Amino acid sequence: MTIQQVVSEILTYIRNNGGRYADWYAGITSDPQQRLFVEHAVKKSGDAWISRDAENETMARYAEKQFLDLGMIGDVGGGDSTTRYVYAYKIGPHTKEA
């Protein structure tokens, strides 16, 4: 899957699940399960979330920047050299955006 396909799939998911880009958080990680469900407190069932393998750190950072430039919540500079996943979730009253 190309990085353009990763970005396109995530944007399609966001459009299908509603809200403005500012209602969504985007980030990168090496462990999407830990990051989404433990650290951000996203609910596996009932919340709108998506993660995709961007294949490497460079591509994950590229995708993250695309989402942040659209107005999604998040920040650049996270992750490390093992980071290869990009994710997004719809912000809710129970989620943690830190």
Image (cartoon, rainbow, N blue to C red):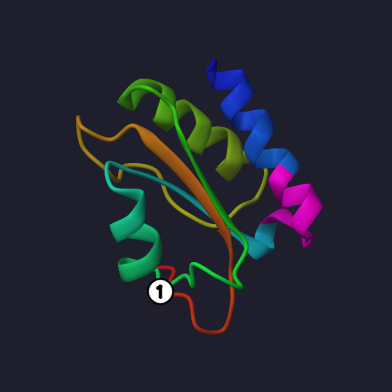
Drawn side of residue 40 relative to residue 80, left or right: right
In this rendering, the answer to whether 10 lies above or below 40 is above
What is the residue that sits farthest to the bottom in this orientation? 93
- Residue 47, picture quadrant: bottom right
Q: Residue at x 49, y 73 (%)?
A: 43
- Residue 77, picture quadrant: top left
On the image, the x and y values in percent for residue 95 come to 48, 76
Image quadrant occupied by the C terminus = bottom left
Q: Residue at x 74, y 40 (%)?
A: 12
What is the residue that sits farthest to the left in this orientation? 81
Predominant SS along the magenta part? helix
Q: Residue at x 40, y 61 (%)?
A: 36
Q: Is residue 16 magenta?
A: yes
Residue type at mark 1: give it.
Ala
Q: Secondary structure at mark 1?
A: loop
On the image, the x and y values in percent for residue 71 come to 65, 50
- Provide the residue designation for mark 1: 41
In this rendering, the answer to whether 52 lies above or below 75 is above
Which segment is the magenta one?
13-21
Drawn side of residue 67 relative to residue 64, left or right: right
Residue nearest the observer in this picture, 48 or 65: 48
In this rendering, the answer to whether 81 lies above or below 98 is above
